[in-house]
Every structure is written in C-alpha cells, then in structure tokens.
C-alpha cells in the first residue's frame, strides 16, 4: 500500500501538571480502517481532538499528505481533508439534508444559491454512503440517528475528505443500523478514504478494522494488525496486566430485598430486566455506551417512563416518578452534576436541603435547620469550605459531590442510586466518597452504583451486573468481580476459566 | 464546620473594625450585596428630595407615596414568587385592569360589594391557574403565552367598558382614603402580601421548592420536587395578588378603567429585578422586592415634586433598572473569578491585562 495520508508522532498534551497524552503516535494509510481503543481516561478523545485540530497539542508533530504542520486549527484540518464525526450529532435539524451535507459550502453564483447544483452535489455524496433513496430535500429533523450519522459522513465526502474520524458511532444504533453503517464505511474505504475508528465495542473492531492502536494512561501501547489479535489478548493490552488482582472482601451481608425491579422494558434500551437490591450491599452496574446502563438507573428512580414492567420499593410501594422514589427513601445522584443536580444560584444549605424538601412530609423548613443540616453533612463528609453560606458553584468537583451525597443522607434515604459518583472528582475526594458509600452500606443502606470506571466497580461492588444491549449479560459476586472479567463480559465474551 | 466554630472569634476580631465587618458581610451575604446599595440609593434620593422640596417630608406626601406604590407592590409580590421559580407572567397588569372592570360592572349593576370583591379576587386566580396548566402541560414559554394573553385580556376589558371607565361612586373608596396608624389601607394590603410571600419563600416547602425549580428544574425534578404542582401554586398565588391589585386599582380610581393596568407588568418585573430577582430564576427575596418597589415609587414621587416631566421620570426609571442589573452582573463576575474590578473592565473592553 501507499505511504500514510496522516501520521502523528510524539504527541504530548498536558493540562497543568496532568499528562493526558504522553508521546503518542499513529499512522493512517489511504483505504484502511484504523481502530483506536483504550479504557476510560486512556486519552482517545484527546488524541482525536488533536488530530481534528480542536485541541492544540503541547508537543509532537502532525504530518498530513507529506506536509508537516506545526499548529492545526479545525479549519486547517478540514481544508487538508480531515473530518471528525463526533459522538453527538452536529447537524441543523431545521435545514434540509442537502443543506446539511453542503453546510458552509453551498454552491452559489453572485451570492445566490444554485439550488439544482446543490441537490446534485448532495445526492452524489449521499449515494456514496448508501443513502441513495433519501431525498436531499427532506428536513433533517425527521431522520433517524443512523441516517443523520451517514449524512455527516456524506458531508465529509463531499468536502473531499481523506481522513474520517468516527467517535463511538454505534453508541445509539440498533444491530441492523450498525450493519448498514459498516457497509457504508467499507464502501467509502474502497474509494481510498482512511478511517480512524474509536469504539468501546471491541467486537466491532474485529469486524471492521485493519489495524488497531491501543492507548493506556495516555501512552501508546501497541499498533498491530487486527488479524494478529484475539479478544482476550486485546483486553490484556487495554488493561496492562494479565493477572486478576483479587481484593479480599467480606461477602455481602444478606439483608432483606429493599428494591425490586421486574421485567423492565423500554424501547431497545431495556429488554426485560429484573433485579433485586438488598439492604447492606453495593450493587454495581457496568456496561458500555448504549448498553442500557444509564436508562436502567433512571428507570429505577422513576425518572424515565417504562414501556413495561415495574419498580417496587419493597414494603413502601411502586416507584413511578422521582417524587415516588424520594418519598419511599430512594435518593438519586446523576453523573452530570452541573446540569442535573446542582442548584448553582443557591448556597450549600439549600443544596443539602433539596432532598429533605421532597422526602419529608413537612411544609415548613426553617433557615436555622437548613444551616444545621448543612453543617452536619459538611463535617461528616469532610467538605472543604471557606464561608458558612458558601455558594456551591465555587467548590471543587469532589466537594460538590460530597454535598450532593449529604443531600440524600440528610433526607434519610435508605437506597442510594449513584451514577458515576466519582466522575470529575479528584483522587482524595474519590477515596472519601468511596468510604462514605461503604459506610452507608455497612449501616444497612442499599446502593446501586453505575460506573464506567471498572477499577471503581471492583473496589466498591459486592455484586456486579454487566449490561449489554439492554440485557443483563452476567452477574458477578464478591471477589469474582475483576476488571478483566467485567471488560470481557461488556464485550460479549466469556471470561477466562477461573484457576482452581 | 470549622467556619462556624470560629464565627464568634471572628465577630470579636471585627468588633473594633466596622469597615472590615462590612466587607465580610459584603463578601459572604448575597442579601447584603443586594440590600445595601438599594438602601443607600433610597436614602440618598430621600435626602436630595427633602433638601430640594419642603413638601417631600410632610405627612401628606408620605401618605401619597405609600398609596401610590400599593398596586405595583402587590403585583411585584406575585412576580417575585414567579421569578424565584424562573416563571414569568406578562398578563398581570391587564388581568388587574380586567378584574377592576369586572368589579365595576358588577357593583354598578347592583351586586353587593362583598360578592364583587370575591369575584375580583377569583377571576385572576383562575386566569393564572389556566396559564400554569397550559405551561406545565404543553411546555410553551410563559413569556410568549402571557404576552398573547396580555393583548387578549386588554381587549376583553375594552369590549366590556367601551372607551369609558365604569364608575362605582364611593364604593370601595375607603381602601385608599382610610388609614390605620396614618398608613393607607391599600399599603397595609401590600405589607400583608409581602409578609405572607416572605414567609412562603423563606420557610415554606413551596417557596424552597420554587427556588430549586428556578435554579435547576431538572435537578428539582430528579430530587422528587413536584415541579408542575409548584408552578401551579405559584401562578395561583400571583393571581391572588393580581386580584388584590385590581381591587386597589378600582378603589383608587373610583372606576373600572380598561387601560389602568398597562405597563404595570414590566414595572413589577423591574422592581423585583432591582431587588435581586433574576429572569433566569433561583433568586430574589420579598425584602429586596420591597426595596425595589419603594425605590421606583420614590423616584416618581420625588421627581414629580421637583417638577421633572414624566418623560424624564421614565428615563430615570429605565436607567435605574439598567444600573441595577449591570452592578449585579459585575459583582457576580468579580466574585466568580476572584479577580479585581480592573481586570473585569479590561475583559469587558476586550483588552489584554498587564497584570500577568
């Protein structure tokens, strides 16, 4: 094959003292599909942003079509034929398909749109991705996620893309749509376009990619032809060790069932899930993007409607809304604190008080009690504050999360449903949060914790459920919970037989 | 909590240094940052007016002032409740006028004053509750919905009265003319609404939920707050203040006038925002709104005494609102960034700072 269309060498990216990328390199050749894999925080997203010109690297070089470029801007990257199809859709829903394909490049004469030429150009690009039946005059809004994604690929093609970067393209797709996407990618590949394909789903990589580059902790681990690897070997490379690290842990105390879910169904996100949560245990839920993990948690607290099935707080009644959940002693902490949990305009006391507000039947809330409650939680959870009535926005992520945990402790919650509790939290606070969660369980509370951080899953879980495509793929108990097994199961593989 | 443990010590340390204590209050209390400049502005304006006109500090003028702010004050109480939850009702002025017109028609048609007043209170509550239901169910923006309703209600009032106000003679007059402890009854009504509203915002689950909904509706929902019911209750309460404002309007004018409420909704929002509320929700207090109402009322009163034309008064009122929001925004930036005023101004002027 010919020389590389794009090569990056020795890319370093530092944020303050943190090295997110530490001397990473890879080469893309025309007409090949190159997969980029790595565990959470390995630096995949940063690397593709560097290649697309969205993030300036601290060091290293990018060579595009034989020309070494010092600084890449999004515009320069596009001019040189590098296009990123991000995880979230970037389209204008109220414009037509044709206008979206040619966004920013509509053909004009004397400043006026050449409508015929636009439709022709768009139709040509759409045909290349297998959307020949789609009328370019349709509005974007009516398209499915899969179609929208292909329109974005068509946009890249019509702009003479030589490199297309796809970030987790299958996250929101069903199996048929994934097949159609792969077909489109292969078709475009044959026209000499190079793909950089990022995905958590390792089986997709075996199905699609010619080569795979593994990143770990911001470092380049290896680049190998996909043919020379199998799933277990790839997982070992991802995690960087082969031995199970078994942490001794007391077996879960067999408390009574406090929360039960039966046959939960919701679109293709949840496909008949049943589970029991017992007092005194930490139940971990893992699973990749699109596995249904996020939806399961929201259904458990009544924040998403169900197509079928039910959630019951045993002895208290059904959970159909967050108000039900809170009244029946269930507290929920969402992963995106800023947009779903924090009251940015209010002080610490009001942020703690929010849980009690809905949980208690009382109509009166005295300022003195609010402050006292906040002080209890601030002391108990070790929140570092400077002023008594401090605004929550000025706290660090870790301290914010402690305040939010305090919200539910103060409300007297008996079941905690936590989504990525240590996302964006510093290491010290992470330890403190973990201790608080264990203490809550030891005192007889029940915890459901979803996380994509497998180390956290192993450290905290008494029991682990691995989700895949809307179902519970496997359940692990106690010391059987290891990062290797969790990852293998997330990928749909069978864990290695246990050594006797 | 370490900060509270050291609080008495801090108080002692600052006992001899009022400036430092003030600075600390300024830094730690949102309320102090809102109230102190407002109080200063009210005192300064009062001092200037009493120096320039001997009529200003007379018992009669104070009564006129208090009487003049009652309607705006009542509407501002309702608006403050709505703004706490990030809601808005632009139809309140027109609804108050409609309430006055309907009351006038009833009374002049022979209905007893008591029944008329009940209808005058109930009608705006029903209108506001309907607005809330539509907002909750269809998720339309209250701004657009109530902007449309403003026109509709104005038209209904005009259709009811034709061009001429409906006189009610001396009925209801006592609300504006009688006084208790030298203060007009209509102003006491405003004070009562303030107290009730203040208790709701500070102590009641409804008020605390309102702040949560206004600050982050999704967070409030996930924390089990019945968001729809909270909005419904707040709109209904605001409707009650609108009804009371309608009664006071009718008693002030002695007639139901279709145009008597026009522009009041914007003044009420202005008064609440000057007093610390924000259109984005999650902020505001009854005491702040009280100061906002008094400042706006004082401007009109003082400038009228000083023979300033009503056009120029509008200029001053608009300037006050702009100054208030600018000061709030700058203070926020200062606090959020922990930077100096100079560096903020440099950013605003898009010039690089030389401090680095």
Image (cartoon, grey):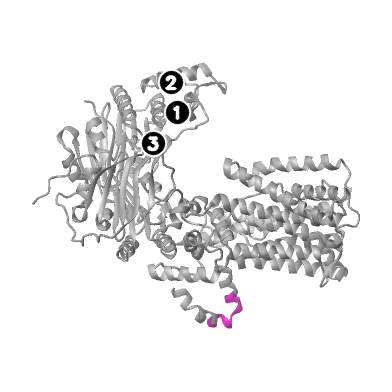
At horizontal 20% and vertical 47% (from top left) the residue drawn is A485
- Which of the chains bears the disc numbered 3? A
Whichever of callouts 1 and 3 sits on the residue coming sooner in the sequence is 1
Query: Which residue bears the numbered disc 3?
Result: A267
Asked if residue B16 lies in the magenta stretch, the reply is yes
The image's mark for residue A143 is 1
In this rendering, position of residue B61 left or right of residue A305: right
Q: Which residues are magenta?
A: B12-21
Query: Which residue bears the numbered disc 2?
Result: A134
Could one spot residue A47 in this view of the protein? no
Residue B115: percent from left, percent from top: 80, 54
Q: Is residue A250 above or below residue A213?
A: below
Corner quadrant of residue B55: bottom right
Could one spot residue B61 in this view of the protein? yes
Question: Badge 1, how many Cα within 10 Å: few under 14, some, many 20+?
Answer: some
Q: Is residue A262 above or below residue B53?
A: above
**Numbered disc 1: secondary structure:** loop
In this rendering, position of residue A47 left or right of residue B180: left
Same chain under badges 1 and 3? The reply is yes
Residue B126: percent from left, percent from top: 69, 48
Residue B177: percent from left, percent from top: 87, 63
Asked if residue B84 lies in the magenta stretch, the reply is no
């Amino acid at each position: 094959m010919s020389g590389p269309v794009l090569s990056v060498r020795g890319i370093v990216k530092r944020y303050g003292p943190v090295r997110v990328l530490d001397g990473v390199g890879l080469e893309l050749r025309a007409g090949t599909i190159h997969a980029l894999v790595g565990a959470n925080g390995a630096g995949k997203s940063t690397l593709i942003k560097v290649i697309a010109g969205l993030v300036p690297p601290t060091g290293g070089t990018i060579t595009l079509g034989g020309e070494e470029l010092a600084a890449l801007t999004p515009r320069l990257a596009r001019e040189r034929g590098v296009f990123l199809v991000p995880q979230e859709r970037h389209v204008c829903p109220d414009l037509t398909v044709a206008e979206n394909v040619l966004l920013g490049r509509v053909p004009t004469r004397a400043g006026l749109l050449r409508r015929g030429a636009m439709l022709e150009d768009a139709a040509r690009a759409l045909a290349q991705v297998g959307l020949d039946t789609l009328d370019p005059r349709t509005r974007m809004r009516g398209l499915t996620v899969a179609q929208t994604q292909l329109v974005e690929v068509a946009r890249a093609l019509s702009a003479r893309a030589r490199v297309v970067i796809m970030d987790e393209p299958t996250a929101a797709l069903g199996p048929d749509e994934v097949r159609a996407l792969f077909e489109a990618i292969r078709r475009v590949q044959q026209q000499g376009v190079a793909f950089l394909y990022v995905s958590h789903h390792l089986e997709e990589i075996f199905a699609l990619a010619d080569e795979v580059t593994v990143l770990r902790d911001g470092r380049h681990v290896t680049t190998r032809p996909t043919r020379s690897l199998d799933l277990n070997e790839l997982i070992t490379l991802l995690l960087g060790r082969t031995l199970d690290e078994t942490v001794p842990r007391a077996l879960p105390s067999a408390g009574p069932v406090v929360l039960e879910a039966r046959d939960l169904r919701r679109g293709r996100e949840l496909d008949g899930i049943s589970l029991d949560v017992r007092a005194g245990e930490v139940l971990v839920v893992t699973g990749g993007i699109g596995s249904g993990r996020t939806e399961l948690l929201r259904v458990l607290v009544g924040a998403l409607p169900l197509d079928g099935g039910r959630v019951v707080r045993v002895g208290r009644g059904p959970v159909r809304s967050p108000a039900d959940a809170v009244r029946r002693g269930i507290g929920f902490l969402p992963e995106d604190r800023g947009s779903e949990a924090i009251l940015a305009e209010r002080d610490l006391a009001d942020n703690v008080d929010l849980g009690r507000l809905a949980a208690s039947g009382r109509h009166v809330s005295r300022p003195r009690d609010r402050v006292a409650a906040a002080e209890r939680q601030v002391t108990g959870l070790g929140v570092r504050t400077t002023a008594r009535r401090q605004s929550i926005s000025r706290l660090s992520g870790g301290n914010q999360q402690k305040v939010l945990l305090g919200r539910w402790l103060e409300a007297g919650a008996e079941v905690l449903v936590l989504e990525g509790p240590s996302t964006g939290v510093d290491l010290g606070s992470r330890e403190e949060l973990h201790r608080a969660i264990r203490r809550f369980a030891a005192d007889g509370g029940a915890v459901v914790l979803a996380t994509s951080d497998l180390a956290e899953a192993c450290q905290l879980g008494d029991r682990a459920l691995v989700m895949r495509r809307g179902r519970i793929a496997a359940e692990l108990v106690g010391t059987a919970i290891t990062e290797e097994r969790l990852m293998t199961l997330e990928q749909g593989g069978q864990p290695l037989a246990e050594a006797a | 909590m370490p900060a509270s443990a050291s609080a008495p010590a801090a108080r002692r340390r600052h006992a001899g240094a009022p400036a430092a204590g003030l600075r600390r209050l300024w830094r730690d209390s949102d309320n102090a940052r809102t109230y102190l400049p407002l109080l200063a502005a009210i005192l300064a304006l009062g001092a200037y007016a009493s120096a320039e006109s001997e009529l200003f500090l007379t018992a009669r003028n104070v009564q006129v002032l208090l009487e003049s702010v009652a309607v705006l004050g009542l509407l501002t109480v309702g608006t403050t409740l709505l703004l706490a939850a990030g809601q808005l009702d632009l139809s309140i002025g027109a609804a108050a006028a409609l309430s006055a017109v309907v009351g006038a028609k009833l009374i002049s048609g022979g209905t007893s004053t008591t029944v008329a007043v009940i209808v005058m209170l109930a009608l705006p509550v029903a209108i506001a509750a309907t607005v809330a239901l539509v907002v909750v169910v269809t998720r339309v923006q209250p701004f657009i919905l109530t902007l449309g309703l403003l026109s509709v209600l104005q038209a209904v009032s005009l259709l009811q009265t034709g061009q001429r106000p409906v006189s009610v003679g001396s009925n209801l007059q006592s609300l504006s003319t009688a006084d208790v402890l030298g203060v007009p009854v209509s102003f006491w009504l405003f004070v009562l609404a303030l107290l009730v509203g203040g208790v709701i915002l500070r102590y009641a689950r409804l008020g605390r939920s309102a702040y949560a909904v206004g600050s982050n509706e999704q967070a409030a929902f996930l924390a089990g707050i019945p968001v729809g019911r909270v909005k419904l209750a707040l709109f209904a309460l605001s409707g009650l203040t609108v009804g009371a404002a309608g009664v006071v309007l009718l008693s002030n004018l002695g007639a139901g006038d279709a145009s008597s409420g026009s522009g009041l909704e914007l003044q009420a929002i202005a008064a609440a925002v000057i007093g610390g509320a924000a259109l984005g929700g999650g902020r505001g207090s009854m005491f702040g709104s009280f100061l906002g109402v008094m400042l706006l009322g004082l401007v009109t009163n003082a400038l009228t005494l000083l023979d300033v034309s009503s056009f120029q008064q509008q200029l001053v009122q608009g300037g006050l609102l702009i100054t208030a929001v600018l000061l709030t925004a700058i203070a926020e930036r200062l606090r959020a960034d922990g930077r100096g005023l100079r560096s903020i101004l440099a950013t605003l002027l898009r010039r690089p700072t030389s401090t680095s």
